[in-house]
Image (cartoon, rainbow, N blue to C red):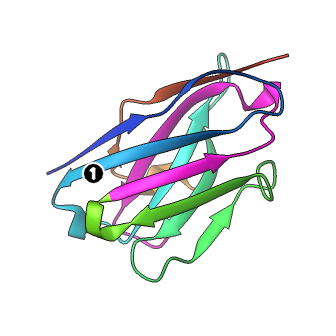
Amino acid sequence: QVQLVESGGGLVQVGASLRLACAASGRTFSFNAMGWFRQAPGKEREFVATIAWNGGSTYYADSVKGRFTISRDNAKNMLYLRMNSLKPEDTAVYYCAGTPYSGSPRADLYDTWGQGTQVTVSS
């Protein structure tokens, strides 16, 4: 069993930066890829970014491409999301997730989820 715990969220102003972290513990070798998703109030959960656990290939949602960077530290079992040039529309609860499949924007392919961390971007 794997547990994921996110941290690093907070309240920031437009244009600021944040780095989210996700600590994985347990059978992390069961993951082929990990991803970040987010859910704003009244909206469905949406894909943000994914990274292969080995090799490091990445894929981003168009809405964050060029502003967000996903990375991982295999030795520490950590996943990160660096968020630059934050906008009010980035306000959401951010979740990290793991999948035994290749990185995908499909949330239903991820079988392990963290509890989420709130990011609020104020204008």
Q: Position of residue 38 (x, y in %)?
A: 59, 36
Range shown magenta: 78-105
Q: Is residue 94 magenta?
A: yes
Q: Position of residue 81 (x, y in %)?
A: 56, 50
Residue 104 appears in the rendering: no
The quadrant holding residue 11 is top right
Q: Is residue 123 magenta?
A: no
Q: Position of residue 113 (x, y in %)?
A: 36, 42
Seen from this angle, which residue lies furthest bottom?
Answer: 55
Q: Kindly state the secondary structure of the residue where label 1 is placed.
A: strand
Residue 73 sits above or below residue 120 on the image:
below
Taking the image as shown, residue 58 lies to the left or right of residue 103, namely right
Q: Nearer the viewer, residue 43 or 22?
A: 22
Residue 5 sits above or below residue 52 on the image:
above
Q: Nearer the viewer, residue 99 or 120?
A: 120
Q: Position of residue 95 (x, y in %)?
A: 48, 38
Residue 52 sits above or below residue 121 on the image:
below
Residue at position x 81%, y 48% in the image: 63
Quarter containing the C terminus: top right
Residue receiving disc 1:
24
Crowding at dot 1, Cα within 10 Å, few <14 / some 14-19 / many 20+, comes out as many
Q: Nearer the viewer, residue 96 or 79?
A: 79
Residue at position x 16%, y 61% in the image: 27
Taking the image as shown, residue 24 lies to the left or right of residue 53, namely left
Residue at position x 65%, y 17% in the image: 41
